[in-house]
Amino acid sequence: MIAFPLLGAAILLCLGKMTNRWGHLLGVVMSLASFVVAVLAFFELIGLGENQRRQAVELYDFIPGMVKMGLLVDPLSISFALLITGVGSLIHIYSIGYMSHDPDRRRFFGYLNLFVAAMLLLVLADNYVGLFIGWEGVGLASYLLIGFWQFKPSAAVAAKKAFVVNRVGDFGLLVGMFVIWTSFGTLTFAQLGEKVSGVQNGVTLAIGLLLLLGACGKSAQLPLQSWLLDAMEGPTPVSALIHAATMVTAGVYLVVRSGSFFFPEGSGAALAVAIVGAATLLAGAIIGTAKDDIKKGLAGSTMSQIGYMMLGAGMGPAGYAFAIGHLITHGFFKADLFLGAGSVMHGMNDEVDMRKYGGLRAFMPLTFWTFFVGYLAIIGFPLLSGYFTKDGIIDTAVELNPTLGWLAVLGAGITGFYMSRMVFMTFFGQKRWAEDAHPHESPKVMTVPLIILSIGSIFLGGYLILSNRLMLFLAPAVGRPAELPSFHFASTPGLVTLALVAVGAAFAWVKYGRAEVPAVAPRGNFLTVFARRDLYGDAINESLFMRPGQWLTRLAVFFDNRGVDGVVNGVAAGIGGSSGRLRRLQTGFARTYALFILIGAALLTGALLLVGNI
């Protein structure tokens, strides 16, 4: 699975321009080959007994006597691998059409292959060291792809921002690994399962919080979410890959994989995960309500939906299946939505401002209907994928932590508003586009992946959740709850959620579907400005970190200039001044030297006479 996309990246990036004519096809073939291997591994796994569904292989000694590098295929890792390679391959195919006129298309596909390979290493490693190498590979690939159009200053800045913010989270993960090693003497998942089982103390809590910091960075959770919206500067297929199949799902994987070790049900670390998830799902939803950039609106949506997954992951084994189920279904409908947005941009001269859209459903019928299916899935329309997985998280949270559960219900209502706003502004209402825009449907190489993703957005959730299929499948890897839950079609939280979603959609229709949308966004009230500025996340980071950092730098420069350089320059100046004064004694006149000799002789004679008398 890892070797195919890694080989594709090596060929495309090392051979360079000689692969320009066929490089994009090689990238697609390598991703599809990895998907085929993942499917074969999946069927081999389900053919085994429940207690045997853990196939590990040791590769080599990474650090002799300390860490062995190995790979692990179990129900959790194969679920992620199928999502990464399946949705990733559809994004590769879509990119053939989307990037058809880009002169660096071959390099773009090389980076996509590298992204998939790194993410596969992350989820298939059998220890934290291999996971960390894949983790950093994902960070590198995201940096390269977000800043792919580096000739745009905004893209270059966004790539650097993503890289720096993620280093903060990576620091937490790395320190957490150090503490794990010093406390338990191993970084392998299987051995940790034996040594940490049932242990809850200050050390395991500290490890859990450090790992959570790492997860917050990759999954754009509070307080490390600020990079995600700027990451939309990359080509749209990159946004789809980051948000649907790779980077932002890594944090959820880390928490669930570490769940039985450092996030056991009822622990302080698990509660911290749930609180972060609840806070982020609300923050992302609020941000999405005020974005006119269609991609940034979807980015806020990703923050929110990953927050739901983290909330589910914080509920222990009872929530793991719903969290992973939502991650899988979200991979389909979020890729559908992002690629649908890319299709709209493709027909609108790369315009991203929804205030310059309107009435596009008549010109892009396939894009509209596939996007509409993704929209219904993400708001939790009954019987579509998101309905089963997100409502499952909400029901579990309300049962185990009512406060956080009802906050999740509120977030669902806001989701109904901002996603409906997006649909109405883009596909309904009056035409508001520029005169030079000629909206048209995208080619089949772009619409066929949209159709496949929309089909998954319809049926996948029910298949995974009903009869506890996913929960029973994942149990050997993540544990089984004491009592298997059953999905309730008419639970109180579920009915309240549907009502709030309907109210949010109706309000969006009144404000953006029926009413005329102004070409320039009105200033709005404080809450609107608050949301437009991403809840002042950048301002907080600048106040707490950037400006103190600037002051510290200026202090260091002052100390260097006036302190270190002052001493060095002072010594040099003193020596130079002294030598200049001594130099004046060397006149070059013989009579002066004779006078000095006479004076010296007289002084020496006087001194000898004085000593002799004494």
Image (tube, rainbow, N blue to C red):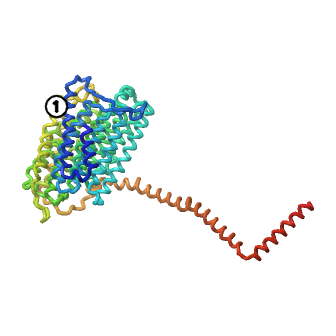
Q: Quadrant of the C terminus?
A: bottom right
User: Which residue type does callout 1 highlight?
Assistant: Leu
Helix, strand or loop at label 1? It is helix
Does any portion of residue 292 appear in the rendered image?
A: no
In the picture, measured across the screen, residue 222 lies left or right of residue 382, that is right
Kindly indicate the quadrant of the structure image that contains residue 500. top left
For the point 47% across and 59% down, which residue is it? 554
Q: Where does residue 435 sit, x and y in percent of width and height?
A: 12, 65
Q: 27 and 329: which one is in front?
A: 27
Task: Establish if 391 lies above or below 11.
Answer: above
In the picture, measured across the screen, residue 348 lies left or right of residue 65, that is left
Number of numbered discs visible in the structure rendering = 1
Q: Say which residue label 1 marks.
A: 466
Q: Where does residue 415 sit, x and y in percent of width and height?
A: 20, 47
Q: Where does residue 494 sit, x and y in percent of width and height?
A: 18, 37
Kindly indicate the quadrant of the structure image that contains residue 37. top left
Q: Where does residue 58 sit, x and y in percent of width and height?
A: 33, 30
Kindly indicate the quadrant of the structure image that contains residue 578. bottom right
For the point 35% across and 56% down, which residue is it? 539
